Image: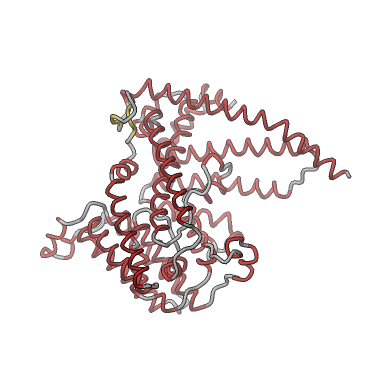
């Protein structure tokens, strides 16, 4: 009876608390949006990257190069999207093609795509990919294969950036003319994703030889998708494919598969090869249509944001240095939301293309950024496919949760190097780890804490909410350092927020 009484008290407290939480959320966003509109209106003449927009008398913030390029190329990309999807699906249906047959179709289509993107530099892509294939096939059974695989791929990850994608003149004067045909997009940027796929191929091939530890029966018992007769991504990833799927044609098709080549989402080799053999059945035509409609709605929200709230322009123009700590907080929070929506749109666009072509990749942004109240939750839901890759091929092989406090430093250092060779990105990675460690310790302590009363649960929720707000602030600081001010700006940031106005903000 005492337990039932406590449960009633908890429910009662939650009912009373809910209206206050809703009112607080409304007040918070009203204040944030009003102040953001005011800042954008007052400073628009000093901001970089604003262009005439489609809303009357409103300038559009296209200061972010990645978003500007994607938005500008959307019509031609969608045309290519349609042609490729139609061709691949018709060929599969007419000739009953399986994995190997479809790999030839996609190799042809993707090669045409890469020639347009990279021109003659496709030679570099194929040469490094072929070397990796030979390395995997020759050394996969040896005990030193995994260090060799990592050294090979990290070596090219660094060299591609240091030598800026190389030049053909490095290999002799008679090859120099090819430097005039380097395409429209730098190949070394896209190759970062190719490296992740090459590592995935190496691990999945080795595990197919040595035997996978994935418990298929136990997974099916607990997975509602697999129980229904379909196959979820985790099942496809964990179940090793047959040896004939590790052929050169399927491997190359996996590396340069057009719908996921530029930006992902990242998919493991096992999951890709399985669906190349038998197309995904988890999304019906209706599901994909609804997915596309939701994407269009999100695009409208992005256009509304960039026309009315110039967050990114503030970040790159340096105007935020002239603002109060409260306004810097608002701009930092806005930039995080802008980045989330930008990547949400880019990743979902390419994922939709892949779905229509029969390959289901993991969802990269399964949860809204404002729903992530701790760093662990944030990183599981921001570029989630990359997170799955890191867990499968780095975190677990390094020891998993047994060495969690050490592993996060290794993983985030790799993430920073994978993005680019810049000190500010390493600063971003190490700051994130620095914020991660106390959270992990606090979560461990919180899990051992037992709440026995309604008042205790209320107190615990409020403390959790406070911790969540600190987490979001830490994310904004790490992103400001990593993508805006750099490590040299840390002193300015600290002095600004520890000043009189900054202390008032946090009180």
The quadrant where residue 457 appears? top right
x then y, percent, for residue 388 = 50, 58
Q: How many labels were placed on the picture? A: 0
Give coordinates of residue 103: x percent, y percent. Answer: 34, 70
Q: Residue 444 location, x and y as percent?
A: 67, 50
Residue 353 seen by the camera: yes
Vertical placement of 316 versus 212: above or below? above
Residue 192 visible here? no
| Nearer to the camera, 243 or 493 | 243
Residue at (55% x, 25% y) in the render:
505
Residue furthest out toward the right: 1
> Compared with residue 100, is residue 40 higher up or lower down, i.e. above or below?
above
Left or right: 160, with 175 as reference point: right
The picture places residue 401, in percent across and down from the top left corner, at 60, 59
* Residue 57, picture quadrant: top left
User: What's the residue at 23%, 58% (across, down)?
Assistant: 166
Is residue 278 placed above or below 291 in the rendered structure?
Answer: below
Horizontally, residue 136 falls left or right of residue 22, namely left
Q: Is residue 45 left or right of residue 245?
A: left
Q: Quadrant of the C terminus?
A: top right
Could you tell me which quadrant the N terminus lies in? Answer: top right
- Residue at 28% x, 42% y: name it: 72
């Amino acid at each position: 009876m005492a337990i039932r009484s406590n449960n009633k008290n908890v429910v009662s407290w939650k009912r009373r608390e809910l209206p206050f939480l809703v009112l607080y959320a409304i007040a918070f966003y009203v204040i944030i949006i009003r102040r953001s509109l005011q800042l954008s209106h007052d400073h628009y003449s000093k901001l970089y990257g604003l262009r005439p927009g489609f809303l009357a008398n409103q300038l559009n913030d296209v200061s972010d190069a990645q978003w500007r390029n994607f938005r500008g190329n959307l019509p031609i990309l969608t045309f290519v999207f349609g042609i490729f999807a139609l061709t691949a699906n018709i060929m599969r249906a007419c000739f009953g093609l399986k994995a190997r047959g479809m790999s030839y179709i996609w190799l042809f289509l993707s090669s045409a795509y890469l020639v347009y993107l990279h021109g003659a530099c496709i030679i570099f892509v194929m040469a490094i990919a072929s070397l990796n294939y030979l390395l995997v096939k020759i050394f996969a059974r040896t005990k030193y294969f995994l260090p060799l695989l990592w050294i090979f791929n990290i070596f090219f990850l660094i060299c591609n950036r240091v030598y800026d994608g190389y030049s053909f003149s490095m290999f002799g004067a008679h090859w120099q003319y090819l430097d005039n045909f380097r395409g429209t997009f730098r190949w070394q940027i896209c190759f970062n994703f190719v490296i992740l796929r090459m590592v995935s191929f190496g691990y999945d091939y080795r595990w197919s030889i040595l035997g996978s530890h994935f418990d298929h029966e136990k997974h099916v018992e607990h997975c509602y998708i697999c129980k229904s007769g379909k196959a979820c991504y985790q099942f496809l990833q964990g179940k090793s494919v047959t040896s004939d799927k590790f052929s050169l044609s399927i491997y190359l098709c996996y590396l340069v598969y057009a719908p996921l080549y530029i930006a992902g989402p990242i998919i493991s080799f096992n999951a890709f090869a399985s669906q190349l053999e038998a197309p995904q059945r988890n999304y019906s035509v209706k599901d994909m249509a609804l997915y596309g409609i939701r994407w269009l709605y999100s695009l409208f929200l992005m256009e509304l944001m960039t026309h009315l709230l110039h967050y990114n322009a503030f970040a790159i123009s340096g105007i935020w240095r002239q603002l109060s700590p409260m306004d810097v907080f608002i701009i930092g929070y806005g930039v995080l939301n802008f980045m989330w929506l930008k990547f949400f749109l880019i990743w979902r666009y390419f994922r939709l293309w892949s779905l229509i072509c029969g390959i289901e990749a993991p969802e990269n942004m399964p949860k809204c950024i404002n729903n992530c109240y701790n760093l662990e939750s944030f990183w599981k839901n921001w570029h989630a496919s990359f997170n799955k890759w890191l867990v499968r091929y780095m975190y677990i092989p390094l020891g998993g949760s047994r060495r969690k406090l050490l592993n996060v430093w290794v993983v985030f250092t790799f993430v920073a190097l994978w993005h680019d060779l810049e000190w500010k990105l390493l600063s971003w990675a190490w700051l994130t780890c620095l914020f991660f460690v106390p959270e992990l310790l606090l979560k461990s302590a919180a899990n051992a804490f037992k709440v026995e009363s309604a008042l205790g649960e209320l107190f615990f929720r409020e403390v959790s909410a406070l911790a969540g707000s600190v987490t979001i602030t830490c994310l904004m600081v790490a992103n400001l350092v990593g993508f805006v001010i750099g490590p040299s700006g840390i002193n300015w940031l600290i002095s600004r927020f520890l000043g009189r106005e900054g202390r008032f903000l946090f009180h």
